[in-house]
Image (cartoon, coloured by chain):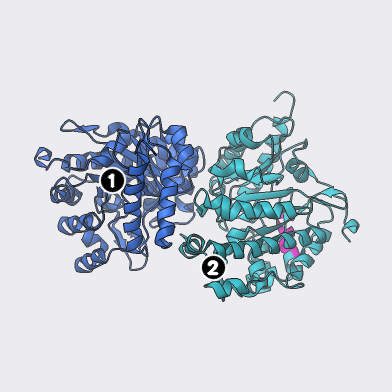
Chain colours: A blue, B cyan
Amino acid sequence: MSSNFAPLKNDTFIKALLRQETEYTPLWLMRQAGRYLPEYRATRKDAGSFMSLAKNPDFATEVTLQPIDRFGLDAAILFSDILTVPDAMGLGLYFEEGEGPKFERSLKDEKDVHALKVPEAGSLQYVFDAVTKIRTALDGRVPLIGFAGSPWTLACYMVEGRGSRDFHTVKTMMYKRPDLMDHILRTNADAIASYLNAQIDAGAQAVMIFDSWGGALADGAYQRFSLSYMKDIVSKLQKEKDGVRIPAIVFTKGGGLWLDQIADIGADAVGLDWTVNLGKARAQVGHKVALQGNLDPAVLFADPDQVRQQAINALEAYGKPAANYGHVFNLGHGISQFTPIESVSTLVETVHEHSRKMRQPSA
Amino acid sequence: MSSNFAPLKNDTFIKALLRQETEYTPLWLMRQAGRYLPEYRATRKDAGSFMSLAKNPDFATEVTLQPIDRFGLDAAILFSDILTVPDAMGLGLYFEEGEGPKFERSLKDEKDVHALKVPEAGSLQYVFDAVTKIRTALDGRVPLIGFAGSPWTLACYMVEGRGSRDFHTVKTMMYKRPDLMDHILRTNADAIASYLNAQIDAGAQAVMIFDSWGGALADGAYQRFSLSYMKDIVSKLQKEKDGVRIPAIVFTKGGGLWLDQIADIGADAVGLDWTVNLGKARAQVGHKVALQGNLDPAVLFADPDQVRQQAINALEAYGKPAANYGHVFNLGHGISQFTPIESVSTLVETVHEHSRKMRQPSA
């Protein structure tokens, strides 16, 4: 089926992930299809709830393409949620208005943990259908990114039953019953590897693993309970589809201290949050991986000339284009729902314009 | 007055901060006087509210000494709150049951910011009275730590008006109106330097600056809006009192990536959260500063043998005692209110016992 998709017109993002030469620095924004867009809010209203939006391939296609239509972004990302996987495992994902996601059945004890199974065939078909539909609708304009949460990040929600500030419940299980934690993480890793490979089969042209809560772990625990399971997933991912490379990106928010180790798990690119110095990161691991990031999303609340200057600073911090450059511009975290749309236009224009300038021989 | 205090019997903590030889690794715990202790909860009930506890020198003395009486800790820390300073600036600190601290008058615009002044003389006298009372009550058993929040961390609360997850309001001001942000930070830094020096005059034997929210800043913004103001404070601190050195500790939670720069601002010691590798940190900056930390507080939810093992791992991670050793054991963040008391006993015993063992010639 994949071979029937339209040929890719803008492959800048894929090339940058593979550290190949590009005419400019590509960019996309985490959570780019979201509430800061009036057209997203309109579709969301039609859909009724977040989950009925995410579970309907037509709606998911519509909102995935909205930021692509509006801005000159260089990649689209599947509209979905990292918690679709534990939901398909039977934990009962739900959202209460004004609050974060919650699970009806969190993993409280040994019995819950041992009952956990990878999702049944078909339970995530709506995601793969959305991927194919979006890829078709994109018609080759930009590549489509598929994604999943990391095993540890999913475990945080699965054990806590909801978001958390200090993750005491999941960390208690981790320190007290590492055997149970490993069982959850093993199950998650298997489920996620299959899930991402099915997204690739359905049409995803790159994949990303979001380790949103890896940065809450202690040094040592991070490597043992988050990174090692991401490494396992990366090793199981299809590296090619129909002869075309499918790059993999891993992103641990708050993982800057572990950059060397993250760069060694076999992914093509590493996402960076805004605490990381881009120039140092490039010097440290740029010979091994591409780097994606890392503007503070709060910069977009400033005035256009300030947004422009901060974007230029970030590009210059990464440094002069050279062989194996490998920079994908992004925010250091998801875009805020309160972001003025003009800031996003300014950002996109500036990154494209200034990064082209940086590639001119005189620059 | 200070000269009338009893001589210090256990100076292990002070010596470790100054990287002098000690018989064992001293330890104390951030937020050691707190809700995990039944005797604290009893005093808190008597006092009525958190602020009437913190503002009453008798109550403050009582709770400061509670963990010293119960465990063999090597330092006491003034019972107070970092928000006493903006409260004394007239912002109206209050607590709502079950929620974090809030301000009645947050800094919303240019007018609010320019009206901001360092606290009037006498407005923080209750803190200095508490310091003197605690120091007297300690009777030289262990040294007393005074403390303050960092200029940036206080500004977060002063502009947001309360705690925050993403600090959008304060970051918007920082990116959009750096001049206003500098005015707040300048005022805070002046107020904090005076506040800490007055604590030293009143009897504090070491001081610590808590930069709880510095880790929310982007690389570059951290150095500009948090670290530089802490450096200014450290340069203004009394280095001695009555001929005795008063060590200064700085702690930016989430600041591990900036360790080199933090170690260069002139403080005697740097606090580390649990994401930092202790051995690497020692190799990196141990020749310049002592290091304090960094056990994950969630470890204390595990079983005693696991607590014991994790404490030993942390001591061994810091490495073999040698000249200028400079390790103060602590948690990487405040102790949780849900911590079992037995875990704290196990931790204290293990750290003392194992660190003595590490100093034996055969070890």
| A94, A274: nearer the viewer | A274
Task: Name the residue type under label 2.
Answer: Val
For image coordinates 53% across by 61% down, the residue present is B178
Q: Nearer the viewer, mark 1 or mark 2?
A: 2
Distance from disc 1 to disc 2, alpha carbons, whole Å, reads 36 Å
Please identify the quarter of the rendering in which residue B311 is found. top right
Residue A174 point in image, percent of width and height: 46, 44
Task: Name the residue type under label 1.
Answer: Phe
Q: Is residue A145 magenta?
A: no
Mark 2: few, some, or many residues within 10 Å (few <14, many ≥20)? many
Q: Is residue B66 magenta?
A: yes
Assign the magenta stretch its main secondary structure. Answer: helix
| B257, B177: nearer the viewer | B177
SS at mark 1? strand
Please report the bounds of the magenta region as a residue range.
B61-69
Give the residue number, with chain letter if any, for mark 2. B159
Q: Chain of mark 1?
A: A
Residue A358 point in image, percent of width and height: 37, 41
Q: Is residue A246 left or right of residue A332?
A: left
Give the number of the disc on residue A147. 1
Please identify the quarter of the rendering in which residue A206 is found. top left
Q: Quadrant of the N terminus of chain A?
A: top left
Q: Is residue A280 left or right of residue A25?
A: right
SS at mark 2? helix
Q: Quadrant of the C terminus of chain A?
A: top left
Could you tell me how many numbered marks the image carries? 2
Circles 1 and 2 on the same subunit: no
